[in-house]
Amino acid sequence: MRGFEFSLAGVELVARGSGALWWPGLRILVVSDLHLGKSERVLRLGGAPLPPYEAQDTLARLEQDIEACDPALVICLGDSFDDDLAAQGLPEPIETWLTRLQAGRRWTWIEGNHDPGPVGLGGTHLFELPQPPLTFRHIAQPGAAGEVSGHYHPKARLSARGRSVSRRCFLLDCDRLILPAYGTYTGGLRSEDAALTGLMRPEALAILTGPVPRPIPMPR
């Protein structure tokens, strides 16, 4: 899978078409908002049943990124689980799969608003991770610089040949990068939303995910 190369705070990074971020210099792979266990949580709260395969699909794609990049460290930028009960109730095959993915590398779970507490799945559990000159956290902070975050599940709409297509996207300016949601059943927030236009500089790019990641001016 191809990637789009760019720099943030002087660091050379790659936005992969899957929605993962790759820092080749330090061999760090970053994903955000896996929301594992969403189908179980929706059913538990009385919602319409969803096909119970989102964890398998999400982890299969994550495994492909890990195999392609061979990271020394994987950072999950929060909301890795749809809530604490979803984390505690993962089926044994999914727990085993996560354990296998963690083997031989460091793994950091960043706290999110859906999963504020540590979970017993190995790895390190942090509120945020400074890795100068970058800082990894779940929710972007106004005025931050060199920040990599998630939370908003950004998506952007591309119009071509009379058709309009919405894709998950990275949002990038000179101060920060916001990652797309990686999880299979995660929705998205359009880049035109005030929550995102208020964070991103006017010259910001939206890097569309897909087989060939494509940068466009951030739709506003």
Image: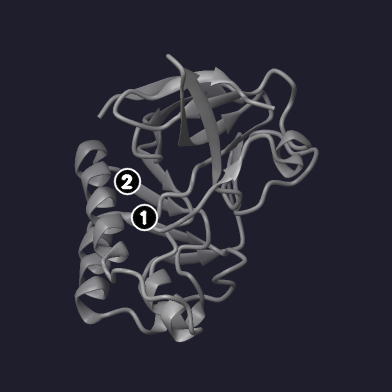
Report the side of 94 relative to 207 (left or right). Answer: left
Residue 37: quarter of image: bottom left
**Residue 100 seen:** yes
Classify 10 Å Cα crowding around label 1: few (below 14), some (14-19), many (20 and above): some
- CA gap between label 1 and label 2 equals 25 Å
Q: Residue at x 29, y 50 (%)?
A: 62
Residue where numbered disc 1 is placed: 184
Secondary structure at numbered mark 2: loop
Can you say which quadrant of the picture contains the C terminus? top right
Q: Residue at x 19, y 43 (%)?
A: 67
Q: Amino acid at mark 1?
A: Thr
Image coordinates of residue 6 in percent, x first then y, are 49, 20
Asked if the residue at tag 2 contacts the one at tag 1, i.e. Cβ–Cβ closer than 8 Å, the answer is no
Residue where numbered disc 2 is placed: 72
Among the two numbered marks 1 and 2 on one chain, the one whose residue lies closer to the N terminus? 2
Image coordinates of residue 29 in percent, x first then y, are 38, 43
Asked whether 78 or 188 is in front, the reply is 188
Say above or below: 125 vs 129. below
Secondary structure at numbered mark 1: loop
